[in-house]
Image: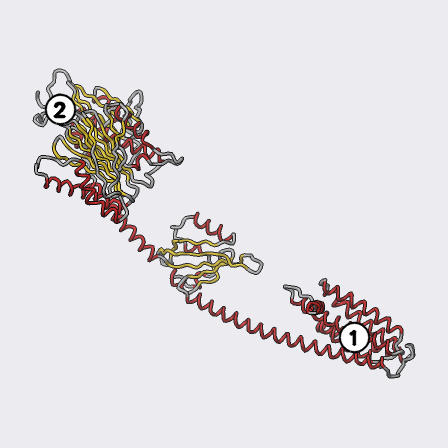
């Protein structure tokens, strides 16, 4: 029963056309007219059947009207409201007129149907319907009256029966339905008006709130049209930029450009917002007084009902103060890091360039300016020293502090062991020192979930031994003879801070002049290139072997390693710290003989990559030139100055903070100066012709070098390393610089 009721209600309800209120309203009226007309026609037919005096023509008209009403109902459901709005009044007018003709008089109740017809037309067509319906009904009544007076109509039957009763009932029902419909439509209209007024009040309240929020917002608001012309700015915008609203409305936001924001950023903004998206970022703009300011901006489009962008809105917050504060914090932190790096390089990481019997060099590239890798050299006597290297977990200042802590623990442990030793001349063994470091640091490292790897190498040149302890550090690479392949030496102990019960043991090897050792952090061998390949221990061994074959010093080999690392990585150091220390043993000088002529090893020193080191170069050449005449010595100094100047000014540096390694060697009747530096090989022209025109800068350097010494050799001892070798022989029949 309920389902049937729902079907009937759905059948009687007018169709609704979403988004078209006019069509829906017209459909409601037509649906009302059709249903009432069907009911009245049915009542008329029922009355005509009960009474016997209804003309046959009236019955035919009623039947045709019923069919037309049924068709109209179906057409209404299909949305043909405009057609029905014209067709139904015409059909009803014809039906009313035909019924009056068949009855033979305008005095019948049917004539009053014109009044209902006029109301229908007025509701459908408003004022035009009023005029047309009034004129048409008047003409119809006039025509029927004239026809009745002329006795052109059938003879009317004025008897009163059931038919007349039902006809009046139909008339009354039509009037009541019309009044009901009009009243219901009025109530609906009033209700809608109240709802619209309430909604409008809510909208106006919301607009006032939004307007107040925008006007009083601490954020800056700017609205432009699609072309970027400013239409609105809020008071905060005026306060932030210094421009009044009247000064910017109608203008383009480009007036705020500071030149500090790239064109690419503006392209990104327009690409995002013109595609319907949103852009957020930081912009640097210019106030009216020329002062720059930073803003955190969010820019997006405003769409209409169809989804088309009509305006753009920007919401901006002044972040100048926070940007300045961030800059101060960054600069302060950068200064702290730089100072920490200076402290680390000068006070914590202490590797001399040479000691008697050994050349040393250290290479360090921290991933964050300061690093957790550490190294230190401690000398026990002229013939005994040890190298401490290590790495702690982590990066940056925290790791650097831990590395400093390990060195402090090393110094304290060494001092404690020396004080507790009954024989003051007995040096604690490397194993004793590392175990003491382990006992003092492991509890603290375990407490902070950290650890440190280290290796301690002791060189005893008198005994010819290398004694070492490796606590989880990378292996050392020991090269026995020049040009041979390095071999890895490694211990079996765990890092410091892993197991409290760990006992560190030492190993010993025989060493001598010509041997070299490189110790390094895992960042060296685990550095990755763009293909994910590791630098590896084999590449490192190849580099050491090539350097030893070329008889290069540790300083030069380290600079070659830096260049090789950068070429392999494809740029600056990656995410890990890079540290290496190299020790190269050579025959020791006699501690009792101080004369220059008793030196059996070259004099090696480093020059800075600037002209300030030329004074040191001059002094060292003079100190070694006792076997050369004064003129020859000055000629060699001149050639060396020209060569060093050319290197500093023209050589293509392969690494930063580079130095020039200078090696001065005494021969029986000659002095040899070699300048070795990290760069590409230099090839001089086949014939040196100095520029005498004065049109070019210099032009005499290579010529002066060639004319000042007996031989000049430009070479590339290994990849990434270049050298120039100057040989000056003593002129026959002259005295030396010392008068001998």
Residue drawn at x 48%, y 56% as measured from the top left: 300
Q: Is residue 183 visible?
A: yes
N-terminal-most mark, 1 or 2: 1
Total marks placed? 2
Which residue is tagged 2? 599
Crowd tier of the residue under label 1, counting other residues whose Cα lies within 10 Å: few below 14, some 14–19, many 20 or above: many
Where residue 593 sits in the image (x, y, percent)? Answer: 8, 25
| Quadrant of the image occupied by residue 68 | bottom right
Residue 43 as seen in the image, left or right of residue 255: right
Q: Which mark is residue 40?
A: 1
Q: Is residue 695 visible?
A: no
| Contact (Cβ within 8 Å) of mark 1 with mark 2 | no
Q: Is residue 445 above or below residue 551?
A: below
| Quadrant of the image occupied by residue 368 | top left
Where residue 168 sits in the image (x, y, percent)? Answer: 80, 81
Where residue 697 sits in the image (x, y, percent)? Answer: 28, 31
Q: Secondary structure at mark 1?
A: helix
Question: What distance separates the C-alpha of mark 1 from that of mark 2?
Answer: 138 Å
Which quadrant is home to the C terminus? top left
Residue drawn at x 14%, y 36% as measured from the top left: 428
Residue 370 as seen in the image, left or right of residue 17: left
Q: Secondary structure at mark 2?
A: loop
Looking at this view, is 346 or 626 the one in front?
Answer: 346
Residue drawn at x 16%, y 42% as measured from the top left: 413
Residue 375 as seen in the image, left or right of residue 238: left
Looking at this view, is 322 or 502 the one in front?
Answer: 502
Residue drawn at x 46%, y 67% as measured from the top left: 211
The furthest residue to the front:
501
């Amino acid at each position: 029963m309920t389902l049937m009721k729902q079907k009937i209600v759905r059948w009687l309800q007018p169709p609704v056309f979403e988004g078209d209120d006019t069509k829906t309203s017209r459909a409601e009226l037509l649906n009302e007219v059709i249903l009432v007309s069907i009911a009245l026609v049915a009542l008329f037919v029922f009355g005509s059947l009960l009474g016997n005096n209804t003309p046959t023509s009236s019955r035919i008209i009623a039947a045709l009207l019923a069919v037309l009403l049924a068709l109209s109902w179906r057409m209404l459901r299909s949305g043909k409201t405009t057609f029905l709005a014209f067709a139904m009044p015409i059909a009803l007018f014809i039906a009313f007129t035909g019924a009056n003709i068949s009855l033979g008089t305008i005095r019948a109740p049917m004539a009053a149907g014109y009044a209902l017809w006029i109301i229908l037309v007025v509701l459908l067509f408003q004022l035009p319907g009023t005029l047309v319906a009034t004129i048409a009904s008047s003409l119809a009544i006039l025509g029927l009256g004239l026809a009745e007076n002329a006795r052109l109509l059938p003879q009317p039957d004025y008897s009163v029966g059931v038919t007349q009763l039902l006809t009046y009932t139909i008339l009354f029902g039509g009037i009541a339905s019309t009044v009901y419909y009009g009243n219901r439509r009025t109530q609906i209209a009033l209700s809608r008006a109240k709802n619209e007024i309430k909604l409008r009040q809510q909208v106006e309240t919301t607009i006032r709130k939004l307007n107040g929020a925008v006007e009083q917002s601490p954020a800056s608001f700017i609205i432009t049209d699609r072309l970027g012309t400013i239409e609105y700015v809020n008071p905060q915008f005026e306060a932030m930029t210094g421009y009044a609203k009247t000064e910017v409305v109608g203008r383009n936001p480009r007036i705020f450009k500071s030149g500090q924001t790239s064109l690419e950023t503006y392209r990104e903004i327009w690409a995002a917002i013109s595609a319907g998206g949103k852009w957020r970022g930081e912009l640097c703009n210019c106030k009216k007084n020329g002062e720059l300011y930073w803003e955190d901006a969010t820019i997006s489009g405003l769409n209409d009902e169809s989804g088309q962008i009509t305006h753009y809105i920007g919401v901006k917050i002044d972040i100048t103060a926070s940007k300045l504060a961030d800059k101060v914090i960054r600069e302060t932190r950068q200064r702290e890091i730089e100072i920490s790096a200076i402290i680390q390089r000068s006070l914590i990481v202490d590797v001399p360039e040479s000691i008697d019997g050994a050349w040393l060099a250290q290479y360090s590239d921290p991933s964050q300016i300061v690093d957790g890798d550490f190294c230190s050299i401690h000398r026990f006597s002229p013939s005994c020293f040890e190298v401490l290297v290590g790495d702690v977990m982590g990066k940056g200042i925290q790791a650097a502090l831990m590395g400093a802590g390990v060195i402090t623990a090393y110094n304290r442990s060494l001092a404690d062991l020396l004080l507790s030793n009954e024989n003051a001349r007995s040096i604690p063994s490397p194993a004793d020192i590392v175990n003491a470091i382990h006992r003092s640091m492991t509890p603290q490292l375990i407490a902070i979930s950290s650890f440190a790897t280290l290796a301690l190498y002791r060189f005893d040149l008198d005994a010819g031994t290398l004694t070492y302890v490796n606590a989880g550090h990378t292996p050392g690479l020991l090269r026995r003879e020049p040009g041979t392949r390095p071999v890895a030496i490694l211990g079996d102990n765990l890092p410091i801070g892993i197991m409290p019960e760990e006992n560190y043991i030492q190993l010993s090897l025989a060493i001598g002049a010509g041997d070299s050792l490189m110790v390094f952090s895992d960042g060296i061998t685990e550095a990755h290139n763009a293909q994910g390949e590791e630098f590896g221990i084999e590449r490192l061994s190849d580099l050491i072997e090539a350097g030893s074959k070329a008889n290069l010093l540790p300083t030069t080999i380290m600079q070659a390693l830096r260049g090789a690392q950068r070429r392999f990585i494809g740029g600056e150091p990656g995410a890990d710290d890079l540290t290496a220390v190299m020790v190269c043993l050579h025959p020791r000088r006699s501690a009792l003989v101080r004369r220059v002529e008793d030196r059996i090893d070259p004099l090696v020193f480093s020059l800075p990559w600037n002209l300030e080191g030329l004074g040191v170069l001059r002094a060292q050449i003079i100190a070694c030139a006792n076997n050369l005449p004064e003129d020859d010595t000055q000629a060699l100094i001149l050639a060396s100055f020209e060569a060093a100047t050319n290197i500093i000014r023209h050589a293509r540096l392969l690494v930063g903070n580079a130095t020039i390694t200078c090696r001065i060697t005494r021969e029986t009747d000659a002095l040899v100066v070699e300048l070795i530096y990290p760069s590409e090989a230099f090839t001089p022209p086949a014939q040196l012709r100095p520029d005498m025109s004065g049109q070019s800068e210099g032009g005499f350097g290579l010529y002066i070098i060639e004319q000042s010494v007996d031989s000049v050799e430009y070479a590339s001892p290994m990849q990434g390393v270049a050298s120039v070798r100057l040989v000056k022989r003593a002129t026959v029949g002259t005295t030396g610089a010392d008068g001998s």
